[in-house]
Image (cartoon, coloured by chain):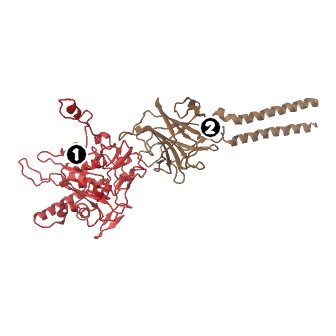
Amino acid sequence: MSDGDADVLVRSELLLLGAFALVVLAAAAVGPIIADARPAFEIPVSDASEDENLDNVSAQGWDAVPAATVSLSSTGSSVPNSGSISVEEAKLGAAQTDERLYLRLSWADPTEDTSTGSLRAFADAVAVQLPNDTDSRPPIAMGGSDNRVNVWYWTGDGRTEELLAGGPGSTTNLGASELTADAGYSDGRWRVAFSRPLDGSGENRVSIPDDSDLDVAVAVWNGSNMERSGQKSASSWHYLALDSDTGEPPYQTILWAIAGIAIVASALITIEGVRRTRGE
Amino acid sequence: MSSQSDDGDTIDLAEGVDHQVAMVMDLNKCIGCQTCTIACKTNWTDSGGREYMYWNNVETKPGAGYPRDWEEMGGGWDEEGQERTPGDLPDQSEYGAPWDFNYEQIMYEGSDEPLRPMDDAADWGPNWDEDEGAGEYPNSYYFYLPRICNHCTHPSCVEACPRSALYKREEDGIVLVDQDRCRGYRYCVEGCPYKKVYYNAMKKTSEKCIFCYPRIEGEGPEGEVRGPACAEDCPPQLRMVGFLDDEDGPIHKLVNEYEVAVRLHPEFRTEPNVYYIPPFAPPQHSERGESLDAERIPRTYLEELFGPKVNEALNTISRERDRVRRGEESELMEILNSDRSEKYRLEVFDR
């Protein structure tokens, strides 16, 4: 075998190894997306534009926003019948523009309860809970006195409220708010779209971060089951993936990159060793 | 908190309350005229989602009351007084609702129909079973029972609210609903065994008797301290108003010394601060109209309403009546027959 043949062999081996390393890196990047291996508790956040009108619950743009399924359970609250709930899961989709965050919730409820106009009438309702201080995670049950939560609340009798809470029973209406809610009921399912400027404009209203994830929890009330207050179907803490473009944890990419480089490097060392033993 | 009285007995007041307003109603004087009801209504509940509410109502006993069968709806505390017992949320129909009469047709449209309720008329309302009572002729019986919020020492409505929207005022123990804190959950409506908290479906909050606190604070007519409107406007003046811990006042004497003023349904264990002088009735009659030596209102029924203490209360009053009949003096009977000037003692404590 001539020197020229050996050079060709080494070059082709290097090409092959390089290609393999690229495949490894690419797999690290797209693999989780293909497999939809979204981390538990993550709510993906889609980029959207203002002209998609996502504050409208039935806007077409919502079709392109992936919704995560969120499990709901009773809260263990001290109010009577707190264990009696009727909704076990909700879907939560999220999108943002440069100015606003949009959240759309939907859940199955066979009864459309929109009245609080008589003594035994309770309206269906939904709430989204966000931490006021985005750096720490408040207690799940309405936050804590030194770790408050900002709650976006819609009820079937037509009210939308932005609330502040620092523990069970402390919910306080923040008054004038730029929060909007649009709701629709069809085919035994409620759909409610919340929208609010990213900027909270005040210490008691969370400002939506653009460089870190944001904790989020949801709760649903079924009026015909006389659900209100702590008698509700509530989720555990999830998070809105606001941190990076793909939303996947960065350590995965780093680990796969290191592995790829190590494979290529060890291959090169092996080839160089082979060449030396051959006395080339 | 409790305060020590001269004879060593303690007067139990709620924790954190300086004084406790109280009312004694003498059921032997109630004529069922509903003047108290209207006085309250025109002051506080004539509109704005309060049309169905009667913070003061007068119902016929025995009878289903207002709301209908409220005594069967639960609420209050368990036997140890520690755990609340769950209560029911009444249906609107159990209170009844105002309805219209056919005035328009008769007065302006030439109708020949008699005056009568329109089709929207309810089939139940406050004191719907007026004067029905119980028993068989010639020994049927009934009496009237005026009711307001009892401003309890151990109020289960306060405990029922997960938001602490209901509270007892520190200065006088009046139970109020903070309208800014209330979010219309209605746990207080369920939790009150007397069903004296009402949901306002227009305001989306619960409301109740406020013991006319602006009047007792001197914010009423002519800037004078006045008793609650239900008491002041009562034609037979059957109510005394003052403080339970005013040891020189008639309420303390009737409740704590003579023990002739008793609580309605003490078994609910909310410790009401409205007390009743239990009713007497003429004795039973024979078929021929002769008076018999038997009480017309069964003691068992009065015990159901007022607990076992009603027996000693009735016995004491009977004994004191006999003293007066014999020409002897009776402080108790003087208190029970006192005039208007002694019925309201609202300025004994610095406020």
Quadrant in which residue B312 is drawn = bottom left
Residue occupying image coordinates x 40% and y 45%: B185
- Indicate the position of residue B125 as horizontal and vertical percent values: 25, 41
Q: Residue A82 bears which disc, if any?
A: none
Between A41 and B240, the one nearer to me in the picture: B240
- Crowd rating for badge 1 (residues with CA inside 10 Å; few <14, some 14–19, many 20+): many
**Which colour denotes chain B?**
red
Q: Quadrant of residue A93?
A: top right
Q: Check disc 1 and report its element: helix, strand or loop.
A: loop
Q: Chain of mark 2?
A: A
Q: Which residue is mark 2?
A: A38
Is residue B253 visible in the rendered image? The answer is yes
Q: Are marks 1 and 2 in contact (CB under 8 Å)?
A: no
- Identify the image quadrant of the C terminus of chain A: top right
Q: x%, y% of residue B321? A: 14, 62
- Percent from the top left, x then y, of residue B283? 12, 53
Amino acid on which the number 2 mark rests in the picture: Arg
Give the drawing colour for chain A.
brown
SS at mark 2 in the image: loop
Looking at the image, the residue that sits furthest to the left is B288
Residue B63, numbered label: 1
Q: Which amino acid type is shown beneath numbered disc 1?
A: Gly
Chain of the residue where label 1 is placed in the rendered structure: B
